[in-house]
Image (cartoon, coloured by chain):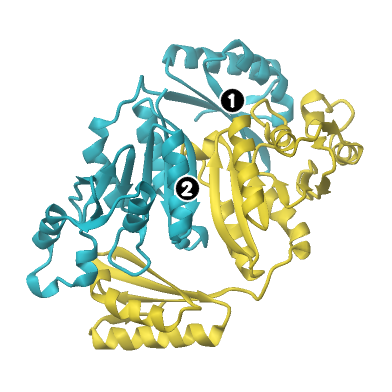
Chain colours: A cyan, B yellow
């Protein structure tokens, strides 16, 4: 089974200043390609932390996607940290420099912008159609921008090359019930369908206890069965089913 | 320096179905107590993954806060995994059971709800004023609910016992500029203020390139200096300063 991890690099995500939007995007895109997103890590703009996390993740998972820290400012240290993690040199990449020179006039080019052309040796560039500064791939690690619009455009260019499996589908149903009343019946449905992953998510809306049951798996017919059994459980418990 | 990590447990966060709201809350609360949130991990509802992550994090950081997986359904496996990670037994806790019995009438009590009273041996309970099922603390690990309202109420009860340091403050300013034009001047400001953490966050709004500069540290006067120098940099670059 193909698995993936995301390594998000950036103090601003940890401080809560910026809310991550890339996990939801990548999680859905990977599921559609039959790749299970198994772990996400968020670390600070700290070289040791990035190196340690990256070296662990790239050995455990089929693919690792990093997000953030490849811009021109002093706090953008991802490329250098990735080079350290792989034990390779960080070098000015002529192809990356040429990309940047299509965007910036000669009088706009400076050392900070050129830093974005410093790429670990042996890496393959990832096209950035939004703002030209490229990402790159090294072995099973894809280094992407943190800005969602750019990350999405970069992913669009690489997704065709990912080896996955049958797409993962999901179905959900929301019941007006409390989790503790559903739990036993839901556990029985899960036991009867070991190939389907069944999740139960409580919420409280307008004073009402709701539970959303989500079924995930590769066989849509099986997911429909799980949902039908969950509806039958709701009838037994006299719990209303809310239309999604 | 006191540091912390958050371990978020739940397939629903990885699938993008549910967007995490606990990192932003805990990050801000911890910063206010002088505790640096250094890492976040999100793992699946998988015992091995939870055990491995927890054992790494609790050795690296002053405090670990877990979020999610302590409810009554089959996919709630956090308490059992925490017991495994610490090598202690998971046992019915009479105090936790008493809490649950204040909420549920005798005819509502069932095995699934009682599961929420199974707590690793040696743990101290964390009060849950919202829905009674308690969290718990074991050594430097705080096991909290995933539902934000409950996590926040639980944190409210434990925050007084956390040993931190001087509160971390932040200041920010937004300039109508491109990062590559600011980078050199900003790096000089960072070099002059090593005790302040200066971050640079680009965005594109209504066709305009903006950069928000965030300064963080324990000395508010120093942060004001950093912001004043950033304003002066903006003047030199003829970049408009947007009121926050």
Which of the pair B190/A215 is nearer the observer? B190
Q: Which residue is located at x 35 percent, y 28 percent?
A: A32
Side of B16 relative to A102 (left or right): right
Q: Which residue is located at x 34 percent, y 27 percent?
A: A33
User: Marks 1 and 2: in contact by CB < 8 Å?
Assistant: no
Q: Looking at the image, is A170 positioned above or below residue A61?
A: above
Dot 1: element: strand
Mark 2 or 1, nearer chain start: 2
Dot 2: element: helix
Rendered-image quadrant of the N terminus of chain B: bottom right
Rendered-image quadrant of the C terminus of chain B: bottom left
Where is residue A42? Give x, y as percent: 48, 51
Q: Looking at the image, is B153 positioned above or below residue A32?
A: below
Where is residue B106? Give x, y as percent: 90, 28
Where is residue A238? Give x, y as percent: 69, 21
Residue pointed to by mark 2: A53
Q: Which residue is located at x 20 percent, y 53 percent?
A: A130
Where is residue A129? Give x, y as percent: 17, 50
Residue pointed to by mark 1: A241
Q: Looking at the image, is B81 positioned above or below residue A92?
A: above
Residue A118 visible in the current orientation: no
Quarter occupied by residue A211: top right
Which chain is home to disc 2? A
Side of A161 relative to B218 (left or right): left
Which of the pair A15/A64 is nearer the observer? A64
Could you tell me how far apart the alpha carbons at marks 2 and 1 are, in whole angstroms?
Answer: 43 Å
Front of the two marks 2 and 1: 2
């Amino acid at each position: 089974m193909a698995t993936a991890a995301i390594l998000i690099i950036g103090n601003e995500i940890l401080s809560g200043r910026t809310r991550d939007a890339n996990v939801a995007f990548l999680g859905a895109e990977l599921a559609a390609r039959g790749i299970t997103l198994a772990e996400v890590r968020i670390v600070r703009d700290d070289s040791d932390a990035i190196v340690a996390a990256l070296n662990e993740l790239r050995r455990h998972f089929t693919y690792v996607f990093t997000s953030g820290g490849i811009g021109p400012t002093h706090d953008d240290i991802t490329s250098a940290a990735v080079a350290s993690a792989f034990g390779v040199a960080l070098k000015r990449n002529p192809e990356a420099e040429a990309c940047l020179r299509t965007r910036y006039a000669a009088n706009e080019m400076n050392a900070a912008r050129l830093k974005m052309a410093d790429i670990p040796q042996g890496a393959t560039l990832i096209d950035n159609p939004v703002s030209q500064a490229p990402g790159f791939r090294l072995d099973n690690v894809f280094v992407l921008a943190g800005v969602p619009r750019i990350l999405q455009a970069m992913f669009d260019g690489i997704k065709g090359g990912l080896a996955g499996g049958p797409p993962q589908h999901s179905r959900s149903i929301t019941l007006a019930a409390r989790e503790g009343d559903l739990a036993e019946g839901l556990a029985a449905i899960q036991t009867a369908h070991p190939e389907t992953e069944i999740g139960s998510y409580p919420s409280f809306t307008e004073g009402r206890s709701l539970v959303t049951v989500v079924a995930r798996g590769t066989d849509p017919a099986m997911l429909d069965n799980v949902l039908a059994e969950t509806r039958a459980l709701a009838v037994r418990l006299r719990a209303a089913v809310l239309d999604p």
